[in-house]
Amino acid sequence: MISRRKFLAVGSLAGASVLSGNKPLGMNVDDSVFTGSPIVISTWDFGIAANAAAWQILKNKGRALDAVETGVHVPEADPNNQSVGYGGLPDRDGRVSLDACIMDEFGNCGSVAGLEHIIHPISVARKVMEKTPHVMLVGAGALQFALEQGFKKENLLTPASEKAWKEWLKTAKYNPEINVENRLFSPAKLPGNQYNHDTIGMLALDAAGNMSGACTTSGMAYKMHGRVGDSPIIGAGLYVDNEIGGATSTGVGEEVIRNVGSFLVVELMRQGYSPDEACKEAVMRIIRKKPETAKKIQVGFLALNKKGQFGGYAIQKGFSFAVCDQNDQKQLIKSPSYY
Ligand code: SD4
């Protein structure tokens, strides 16, 4: 039997087996029930720092819901991360508008879309879940609610993001670039043209065996004002079913919405797919429906099941995800991909 540590070490090879039709290495890792060891996983390399914050809660037997909210606060508050929250790249009108959602172990969920001026949209989404009879608030209504709840109104457009936007205006071409997150993470590497990807999606399983998830983003850079992607849409950008597991996504949200991606991944796991197989099948739905579009875009899914097994799959190379558990707090795994 392959231990999970071993699986982590060969995480990027799992996809090679998926593609060749062999059983993915992750599948037979551990067929026992959850042993009580928490785990948190999240999208992209900025997930490492986010997981570390979430881990502080999980290791002290805290609730997964608190862990994911605290974890995603890290990239939301980082002005050097131009893909999430404060410092996020604006829409084509120069407005930073944020999307986020959160879901707990009871199937409760909350979401905000097109929220401006608030650094932590994930916490506003949690308030929507906990303090209102609704699931989703958008635009001016979401801002009004946030202010009523005591959130501070701030200018989220940093000088670096404003500069990049002004540079972009010179051509004003909307042309989503693949894996731009990898470059956005380092402000030193900002060339000032198209930065169109972002998003942290995080899934956590706590010591009690309960799962929650969070997803937060400034959306596609230079999107039309009012455009909403998959990230705040329950079932698309995030889905958690405490019986089965959870899934989240990153990349071009329109394709994820069209396929109700995260819900699909969870339902595939319900049918017996391992997390990596389920993510692969969700990606294949996108590719089969629109093979020409799929060549030019990135979509990645990430999933965690109730046994603590995880997996990811993307259309393009370059998607990575961070994993943190009691064995290792800083794993970064290269996702297998179709191309
Ligand atoms: C969106 N899915 O707004 C987000 C963007 C993203 O990597 O994840 N980029 O469509």
Image: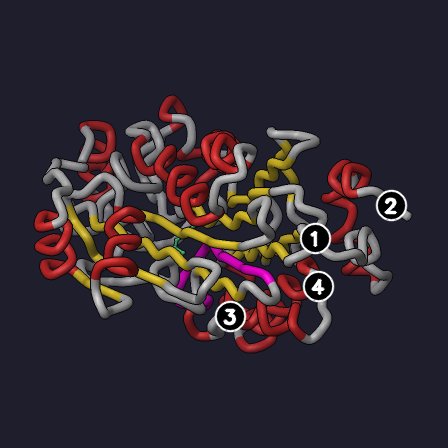
The disc label shown at residue 34, or none: 1
Ligand 1's image quarter is: bottom left
Please tell me which residue is depicted at 59% across the width and 68% down the height of the picture: 282
The disc label shown at residue 263, or none: 3
- Say what secondary structure mark 2 lies in: loop
Name the residue at the right extreme.
Answer: 1
Compare marks 3 and 4 and give the one earlier in the sequence. Answer: 3
**At which x and y percent is residue 310?**
66, 52
**At which x and y percent is residue 308?**
67, 50
Amino acid tagged 2 = Ile
Alpha carbon of mark 4 to alpha carbon of mark 2: how far?
17 Å
Neighbor class of circle 1 (other Cα within 10 Å; few <14, some 14-19, many 20+) is: some
Q: Which residues are magenta?
A: 245-256
Alpha carbon of mark 1 to alpha carbon of mark 3: how far?
22 Å
Alpha carbon of mark 1 to alpha carbon of mark 4: how far?
20 Å
Neighbor class of circle 3 (other Cα within 10 Å; few <14, some 14-19, many 20+) is: many
Residue bearing the label numbered 2: 2
Alpha carbon of mark 2 to alpha carbon of mark 1: how far?
16 Å
Lateral position of residue 50 relative to residue 82, left or right:
right
Q: Nearer the viewer, residue 226 or 31?
A: 31
Neighbor class of circle 4 (other Cα within 10 Å; few <14, some 14-19, many 20+) is: many
- Say what secondary structure mark 3 lies in: helix
The disc label shown at residue 277, or none: 4
Alpha carbon of mark 3 to alpha carbon of mark 4: how far?
14 Å
Q: Nearer the viewer, mark 4 or mark 2?
A: 2
